Image: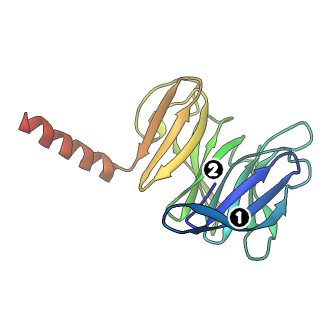
Amino acid sequence: MSSDDVLLVADDGLRVIHQVSLERDGVTIRGKSMRTLSNYPTHIESVESMTILESNVYFAGSKNDKCQGGLYSVSMETTLMECAIQNGDQSCKEIKRVSKFNELLVFTDIGARDVKSFDPHTNEVVRRAGDGCDAQNDGTGRCCSFIQAHGICCISNTVFVTDAAAGKVKLVVGMSGTLSFLYHLGLIYDSL
């Protein structure tokens, strides 16, 4: 995971997260310094994905025999770590991947077959897409379904979600984006 000047590296062998500071010279990008940001929480064996929001690193820790896993945060300033959401609680079954979306985090809940958002300031979790059914139906918001909601990434106001078992990439957009898309599609159609 990287931002403009920081690269984060999870080392599952040593169970640590490294922070590499980057520098650019117009041609190349080089690491200029590295520090160990944090050790993994007890019993977490691997990190599924990471993202940076404000001055915190958020990562999805995998579930295993000894630990439920969940969404964890590490302060880049103090290196203090805490569990934001534990897998299996009321708000989620099993977090697979996480991404920054505006001032929120969005994540795939592979156990609940949906996409949810998390507000780190209020700790509120909201289902954004998926009805929880084991199907591959397209639709809006809670009317669509996933077989295996897996990967997630965000570009601007669009969330891309991979449904690994269905072999699909689904877009989660607000209505304003959809209306704009349809308007421009109509302009293209009218010009033909």
Residue at the location (58% across, 26% down)?
147
Residue tagged 1 = 20
Image spot of residue 129 (x, y percent):
50, 41
Up-down relation of residue 133 to residue 177 (above or below)? above
Q: Mark 2 falls on what kind of element? A: strand
- Quote the CA–CA distance across marks 1 and 2: 20 Å
Image spot of residue 10 (x, y percent):
76, 52
| Left or right for 149, reference 88 | left
Q: Which of marks 1 and 2 is in front?
A: 1
Q: Is residue 135 visible?
A: yes
At label 2, the amino acid type is Val
Residue at the location (49% across, 28% down)?
168
Q: How many residues crowd mark 1 within 10 Å: few (<14), some (14–19), many (20+)?
A: many
In front: 28, or 125?
A: 28
In front: 77, or 186?
A: 77
Residue at the location (41% across, 55% down)?
157
At label 1, the amino acid type is Val
Residue tagged 2 = 98
Residue at the location (49% across, 51% down)?
154
Image spot of residue 59 (x, y percent):
71, 54
Q: How many residues crowd mark 2 within 10 Å: few (<14), some (14–19), many (20+)?
A: many
